[in-house]
Image: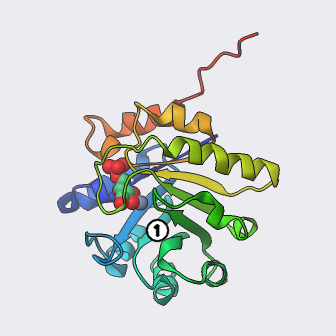
């Protein structure tokens, strides 16, 4: 069964508590939390203080996506404010293997994210160590962008490697995911869908999460 991870970046920050309450009542299993530093990506979101507030009010798994340079400086502090999965960008470190170890050492699950231009084979020698791979399906920095369709073949190739090597990491897809393309993304082998605008900007966010979660359920096997 796949996992829905609404992205809090698309919430109304004046009503953050209400939006978190909605997430708590939803069928989502994760809450995706985007941290941007204005250097690794051309936008600034929020830091540890806000993540602390979010995690104190949210009963879902806190899935922190660090879009920052020097991620190794901040791993412990994000775990301390409630991050349960910590994903850093492979493009932001020269020492991916060490970084994975550092994340796990805190007790959090370890993820690496790849920008759209980064081939999946950079992960070849660390796949065994990872709990999650995040494939960016937009250029990171902003919510509400269009899904880059070349991501689909990356998902398929990564899933093939996962099956071949009998591994168990999450394949999380981040950016431009919604009801229009979720089924296809899941069919390619993803098991975690990040959904920002498609959830928070929809008329009925609870229902949208539920619909995203139900994809694939009603499929009757054809003989
Ligand atoms: C983009 C972020 C995404 C973003 C997704 O840089 O990493 O997690 O919140 O937003 P949508 O779903 O609106 O594309
Ligand atoms: Zn993200």
Query: Is label 1 within 8 A of ligand 2 (CB to nearest ligand atom)?
Result: no
Residue 179 on image: x %, y %: 41, 32
Where disc 1 sits, the SS reads strand
Residue 20 on image: x %, y %: 34, 57
Q: In this view, does 190 lie above or below 54?
A: above
Q: In this view, does 177 lie to the left or right of 161?
A: left
Q: In this view, does 51 lie to the left or right of 18?
A: right
Q: In this view, does 29 lie to the left or right of 10?
A: right
Q: Nearer the viewer, residue 74 or 95?
A: 95
Q: In which quarter of the image is the N terminus?
A: top right
In this orientation, does residue 196 appear?
A: no
Other-residue count near label 1 (Cα within 10 Å), few / some / many at <14 / 14–19 / ≥20: many
Q: Quadrant of the C terminus?
A: top right
In this orientation, does residue 167 appear?
A: yes
Instruction: Determine the residue positioned at 38% across, 52% down.
Output: 138
Q: Residue under label 1, please give it.
A: 64
Q: Quadrant of residue 139?
A: bottom left
């Amino acid at each position: 069964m796949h996992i829905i991870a609404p992205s809090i970046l698309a919430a109304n920050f004046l009503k953050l508590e209400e939006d978190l309450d909605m997430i708590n009542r939803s069928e989502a299993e994760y809450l995706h939390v985007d941290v941007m530093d204005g250097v690794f990506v051309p936008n600034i979101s929020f830091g540890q203080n806000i993540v602390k507030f979010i995690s104190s009010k949210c009963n879902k798994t806190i899935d922190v996506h660090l879009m920052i340079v020097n991620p190794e400086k901040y791993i412990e502090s994000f775990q301390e404010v409630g991050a349960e999965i910590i994903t850093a960008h492979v493009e932001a470190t020269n020492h991916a293997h060490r970084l994975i170890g550092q994340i796990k050492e805190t007790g959090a699950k370890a993820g690496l994210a790849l920008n759209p231009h980064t081939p999946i084979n950079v992960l070849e020698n660390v796949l065994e160590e990872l709990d999650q791979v995040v494939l960016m399906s937009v250029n990171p920095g902003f919510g509400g962008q269009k899904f880059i369709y070349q991501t689909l073949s990356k998902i398929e190739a990564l899933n093939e490697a996962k099956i071949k090597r009998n591994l168990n990491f999450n394949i999380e897809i981040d950016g431009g995911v919604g009801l229009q393309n979720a089924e296809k993304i899941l069919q390619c082998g993803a098991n975690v869908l990040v959904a920002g605008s498609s959830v928070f900007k929809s008329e009925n966010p609870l229902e949208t999460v539920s619909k995203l979660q139900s994809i694939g359920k009603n499929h009757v096997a054809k003989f």
